[in-house]
Amino acid sequence: MRKGFRLIFRLVVASLVLGLTTLILTYIIVIKDLPDVNTLRDIQLQVPLRIYTQEGKLFSVFGEKRRIPVRIDEMPKHLKNAFIAGEDARFYHHPGVDYQGLSRAVWTLATTGEKSVGGSTITQQLARNFFLTLEKTFTRKTREIFLALKIEGELSKDEILELYLNKILLGHRAYGVGAAADVYYGKSVHQLSLAQSAMLAALPKAPSRINPITSPKRAMTRRNYILGRMQELGYISDQELQQAITEIDTAFYHGATTEISAPYLAEMVRREMLQRFGEAAYTGGFEVFTTINADLQVSANQAVIGGLEEYDQRHGYRGPEASIDLMDNTTTAGWDDILRPYKPVAGTAPGLVTEVEGDIALVYQTDGQTIALDLDDVKWARKFITRNRTGPVPESISDVLKPGDIIRTRLQDEGRRQLTQLPQTEALLISLSPRDGSIKALVGGYDYTRSKFNRVVQSRRQPGSGFKPFIYSAALEKGKTTASIIMDAPITFSDTELERDWKPQNYSEQYFGPTRLREAMVNSRNLVSIRLLRDIGIPYARRHVSLFGFDPAVLPDNLSMALGSASLKPINIARGYAVFANGGYLIDPYFIARITDARGTVLFAATPTVVCPDCDAESGPETIPEAQPAKDEPSFMPLELGGEKGGFEIVEQDEHKSNAPPTAPTPAPRVISAQNAYLVRSMMMDVVRRGTGKKAMALGRNDLAGKTGTTNEQRDAWFSGYNSEIVTSVWTGFDSHQPLGRNEVGGKAALPIWINYMRTALQDMPDEPPKIPAGITHARIDVDTGLLARLENRNTVTEVFKMGSLPAKEDVAAIDQSDTTSTQENPYDGF
């Protein structure tokens, strides 16, 4: 027996020595190939691109992986405890490897041959997720164990837990607890309940198989197990356990939580970032802060949607999107299947008319609710016949709807839903600061999901009469005045290329004879503009207009240019109007204010061109460049417009220098004189006060100027308007260039959108008419002749002129020849 014990003892000792030797040799072999744990301290998690407004409100996220990094001290205690209870109860007590769990795994392998029971600690999972593969081999497991021990020797427990909870895949492309809270519950980690925290902790075991969205029963079972473990470990009380177990889980898929909608601008940013950083733009944790104002963007979205639907309803109801036979579909499940292909668009909700009786129609919606529509909710829906003709006003709801119709409704301010339809027309709105070109709001169409075509920067449309201010500016520079008389009368031009005559007309098809330039602008007289262009010369006009940033190559070399026949990008129309708004300076539109990396370091900052009147004073007498072809168009969209710097100067910050954005402004070049800009603006102020844009007076302000624009057969409708602080252009029309319909001019189709947006944009903005620049004087002129009026003449009006450009006298004129200063009372207040 003694010999037997000695033999057993020797075998045990030999086994221990052999095992220890093997362990040491394995460590020596493996340790050389283990990665440096210090790299975990500087690990760059794949964080998506996030885009914000100027106030810091999130409006878009780009990237395959949803990840919202959260520091360990920001995670609620019950969330950390839930993961520890579910994954590694002895996390704070073992050195990286739980020998108890590992022993169980070894015993299971020895007795059953199965490798399915793990024993992996949180530290081992971290090692595997960052450095190793998921293959189930002894070599990988050995490396995992040694690497876990190494990690524990160099990182604190909290550092390990923070890395783990931010790295782990939790299903539906959510990496880390921050993203998972957002994806499943639309919350931040601080807002999670105990039960919701336990649900997230249930996911690491099998995120695709145990999931509250795809397999809620399995997920609930695992959640309740986690809660039970938390109670066993003393993390929660019996009462907290019972409350959490009875809590109904509300998980469903949430898209990235954004605060406002600006998809067209977001796509512009995405393309810009992809151009600069390649695919790393989607994973590098970049944050882009744009120039967009959140409140203005919301208002712009609403104005465009409302304006298009208002236009659409004026032209009648085209009928349901589809009609089905309800005899074969009598259950809500069947109705859900019918409605599944129809998605919400621009806030409209698809629905199925299930019953029409008396004055009520019942509509089943995709959210499972049934609403009732009455006659008032469909009163607008006269039958569409053509764009110039509709049927009679409906007298009963059955005149509009029948069972089986698939329709759309929109929630009204009073809480009721009203019948609507998706407009066939489109619209755009671009609003920017004339001081530095920063874009404050941008809407490229009715709905981005319906059409991703960004009409602000990708379309080219004819501005129609909205182009006339640039022609008038050229005429003033050539010696005309606001009181110059131009004949408004029929004119015919022979077109040898088309072998026909061109007979332009006024919109009203009426003619008013000799007309002062101001009145021609106010009433948008086409024949005056054509004669004006002919008088000053097409080559001169093209050179002058190019100073506003337009490419002369796209400006027609004929008299049709006077009527806005050039096909121009809408962003450039707004840029051109900004020259009048800021007193004569050409700014560059831009939309990215700064870009930061995942650590908050400023990588790039905007250094826009800024209007700087003081710079003129410092540089001596005002000088205007010779009229010449424009420089490249604004380069904020390099893939579209061919620039390199995206409308902002790149300032790469040195790591040893301050991260503060540069503060020195780049002065914007003066392209027209302050006097020219003021005179054109004074005429456009009268357009708003008493001309084609007078609806804008509903805003109750005296500082607004603008111009309507309408092209042949009402294929384009525009309104561009401004004050000294903001410029906004609105266009509406068909992408297919079809006519909008009779009387759908700029003042009717586009101006209401502009008004509704500017009502928000002008809030808290002082109503200050423009300051009168030096070199401007005013005089009384005869209304009919435009000449300086005699003292006894009562048929007069006060007009403004550039000093040295006064018209001839009738006889002895009553005139104030003194130079007008910037503090002089504006003679056009109250006109």
Image (spheres, grey):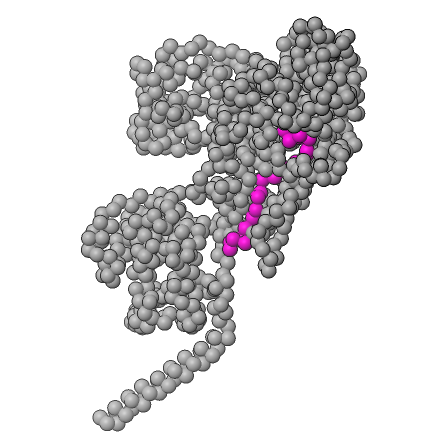
The relative height of residue 361 versus residue 242 in the rendered view (above or below) is above
| Residue drawn at 33 percent across, 66 percent down | 91
Picture quadrant of residue 682 = top right
Q: Residue at x 67, y 42 (%)?
A: 666
Q: Depth check: 485 or 804 in front?
A: 804
- Left/right placement of residue 571 relative to residue 39 reads right
| 762 relative position to 679: left or right | left
* Rendered view: 429 above or below 118: above
Residue 123 seen in the current view: no
Q: Percent position (x, y) of residue 774?
A: 70, 27
Residue 248: tell me if it is visible.
Answer: yes
Location of the C terminus (image quadrant): top right
The quarter of the picture where the N terminus appears is: bottom left
Question: What is the span of residues highlighted in magenta in the rendered image?
Answer: 579-601
Residue 165 quadrant: bottom left
- Provide residue 137's location: percent of width, then percent of height: 42, 68
* Residue ranking furthest to the bottom: 3
Q: Magenta region, mostly helix, strand or loop?
A: loop
